[in-house]
Amino acid sequence: MAGKIKLDCRNVWKLYGQHTEKLLEEHPDPDDETLAQNAIIGAVRDACVKIREGEIFVIMGLSGSGKSTLVRCLSRLIEPTAGSIEFDGQDLLAMSEAELIDLRRKKIGMVFQNFALLPHLTVLQNVAFPLDVQGIDRKTRESRAREMIDTVGLSGREDYFPMQLSGGQQQRVGIARSLVGEPEIWFLDEPFSALDPLIRREMQDEFLRLQSILKKTIVFITHDFDEAIRLADRIAVMKNGRIEQTATPEELVLNPASEYIAEFTQHVAREKVLKLRSVMDTKLSAKSFAGDIDGNLSIAEAAATVEAAGKPLRVLDEKGKPVGQIDAKAVIDVLVGRPFK
């Protein structure tokens, strides 16, 4: 996936304890034993990520893996112990407090697990609040707030208070509020984890719908691998403060970089992750074809069409060019767990 680098994080460390910078000078890559001997916690360890404009970049890992700490470093809500972070080529760590506040107000949106709505304000007032802080006049901010309320599907509830809304509706208000300032990058820290499973699924659908419209650069944190593979363009998997692997969902399933990644992916429904392009025959050897099919479709999405075709289908790339063929056997191999290559 090509694209402009929006956020570039290089060799970022976040250590908790005394004399952490001195420790890194003496031990540029301290191991667990060195950290323990110095009573230091390695919350983030030598993290490197490049987040591209317009992509959904998911950071996932179990509780305590460092994912939330890393995102707080990326947004500079906390100061990294070492490393560099660039936002659109600007040194984020060199920005003054005033520059940082201006950046957060105008270019960064944030949504957290606890919705953090102001209980004494209506839906309209909550969504408009970031613009109020910027000093934008009431007519303009309420007009933009109403647009975002409509975008997240809450029209008609502008005058409700948070306590009058369901959990899913409150989360939609939080999303609308984070987007009203038209941020260039959107940080979401486990935004759906407090929701019931059915509402969570609905919010994932809503999230994907919004992204199809808004095309934001998104950094999304979750501990749920099913959620990660459903939403992500790329995923960074963390363990004990380190990034174990950064890859597309398909690459994580097909080529796990470690036993830890393999454990994460072993129970994944492969048909939901693998695309036709990954399991197709790259030779167009069939004598005739039943038609064409998009290579970016998942096996689950394409299974019924391929199985009903009766003959192989030509697989097309993003430009509509034939790049291979797929037949029912290849799809069935994936569905029943047989090797497909």
Image (tube, rainbow, N blue to C red):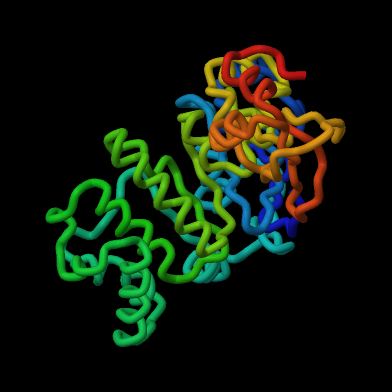
Residue 189 rendering spot, x and y as whole percentages: 44, 44
Q: Residue at x 60, y 29 (%)?
A: 307
In the displayed structure, does residue 173 sit left or right of residue 337? left
Q: Residue at x 51, y 29 (%)?
A: 225
Q: Residue at x 62, y 41 (%)?
A: 297
Vertical placement of 75 versus 290: above or below?
A: below
Residue 276 rendering spot, x and y as whole percentages: 68, 35
Residue 312 rendering spot, x and y as whole percentages: 72, 32
Can residue 168 be spotted in the picture? yes
Which quarter of the picture shows residue 17?
top right
Can residue 18 be spotted in the picture? no
**In terms of depth relative to the viewer, which is nearer, 274 or 155?**
274
Q: Residue at x 65, y 30 (%)?
A: 310
Q: Which quarter of the figure is the C terminus placed in? A: top right
**In terms of depth relative to the viewer, which is nearer, 202 or 192?**
202
Residue 39 rendering spot, x and y as whole percentages: 55, 21
**In terms of depth relative to the viewer, which is nearer, 38 or 117?**
117
Vertical placement of 161 versus 308: above or below?
A: below
Which quarter of the picture shows residue 314?
top right
In the displayed structure, does residue 161 sit left or right of residue 18? left
Vertical placement of 99 versus 29: above or below?
A: below
